[in-house]
Amino acid sequence: MALQDPRAGQGAGENVLPPASLTSGPLRDRFEFLRGFLRHPAQVGSVVPSSHRLEQRLVRSAAIAQARTVVELGPGTGGTTAAMLLAMPPTARLLAVELDPAFHQHLQQQLRDPRLLLELGSAEKLAEFLAARRLPAPDAIVSGIPFSTMPAQVSDRIAAIVAQVLRPGGRFVAYQVRAHVASYAAPYLGTPDKRWELVNIPPVRVFTWVKPSDPSQAVA
Ligand SMILES: C[S@@+](CC[C@H](N)C(=O)[O-])C[C@H]1O[C@@H](n2cnc3c(N)ncnc32)[C@H](O)[C@@H]1O
């Protein structure tokens, strides 16, 4: 499938495959996503991909249009990934880290964009993935991984790594049904801005942190 970026000429990338009408979950993505959920319900945490409304909220909350280096933790079947690629500057990079090999393969086949770098593995290895790709500290990290069902040590490790690698002034945006991510990230990044996105199945909370630019204001 080779589709044109519908926003070509508006500063978006040139080779994003899905147009906006497909980014909120074409049938094939939904089918793949459901299969992923049936394989690993706790790891995937939802039966359908994020809605178009949630994708757009994530793009705004993470200030993706101004970012040069973006990280996505848990891209799944790629709806959120495609939405970020559409919003990103042409020279920006998006590193997407996915734990499920079948989702990773699906992303490789469906999203061909020179700005997209795909890694198979756990978000716990984010620092290694960034170093291996020689990427600078990310301006934005967007996460859909289910902090509420992961072992507490894994959740804490990922929160610590996110806070460590994020550029000062950078944004961490996490969307979740439950609030566990806020308690894991608060020791490192402080109190987040909290919003609900109701137009999603299920409705989710969207937490946004801005890492202090002044190291003396850092929480940990
Ligand atoms: C709720 S789904 C979000 C999918 C997609 N971003 C969306 O919004 O439609 C969570 C995703 O996180 C992935 N995941 C879970 N734990 C992970 C981990 N430790 N590292 C990387 N990805 C993980 C799952 O495989 C799944 O693809």
Image (cartoon, rainbow, N blue to C red):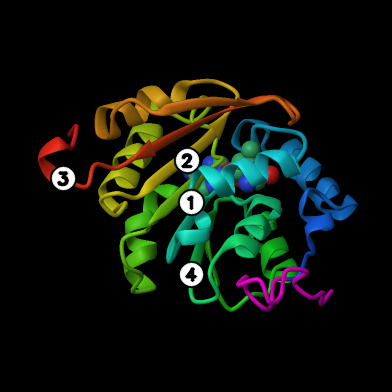
Which residue is disc 2 drawn over? 173
Which residue is disc 1 drawn over? 63
Q: Identify the residue shown where x is 80% and y is 41%.
A: 34
Q: Earlier in the sequence, mark 1 or mark 3?
A: 1
The residue nearer to you, when weighing 93 against 128, is 93
Label 1, label 2: how far apart the Cα atoms are: 10 Å
Mark 2 Cβ inside 8 Å of ligand 1: no
Label 4, label 1: how far apart the Cα atoms are: 14 Å
Mark 4 Cβ inside 8 Å of ligand 1: no
Label 2, label 4: how far apart the Cα atoms are: 17 Å
Q: Identify the residue shown where x is 19% and y is 32%.
A: 219
Q: Identify the residue shown where x is 73% and y is 70%.
A: 109
Marks 1/3 in contact by CB < 8 Å: the verdict is no
Magenta span contains residue 13: yes
Q: Earlier in the sequence, mark 1 or mark 2?
A: 1
Left or right of residue 111: residue 171: left
* Predominant secondary structure, magenta span: loop
Which residue is disc 3 drawn over? 214
Which residue is disc 4 drawn over? 93
The amino acid sitting under disc 2 is Val
Q: Earlier in the sequence, mark 2 or mark 3?
A: 2
The residue nearer to you, when weighing 64 against 47, is 64
Residue 138 vertical position relative to residue 154 in the rendered view, above or below: below
Can residue 137 be seen at all in this image of the molecule? yes
Q: Which residues are magenta?
A: 1-16
Kindly state the secondary structure of the residue where label 2 is placed: strand
Residue 169 vertical position relative to residue 69 in the rendered view, above or below: above
Between disc 1 and disc 2, the foreground one is: 1
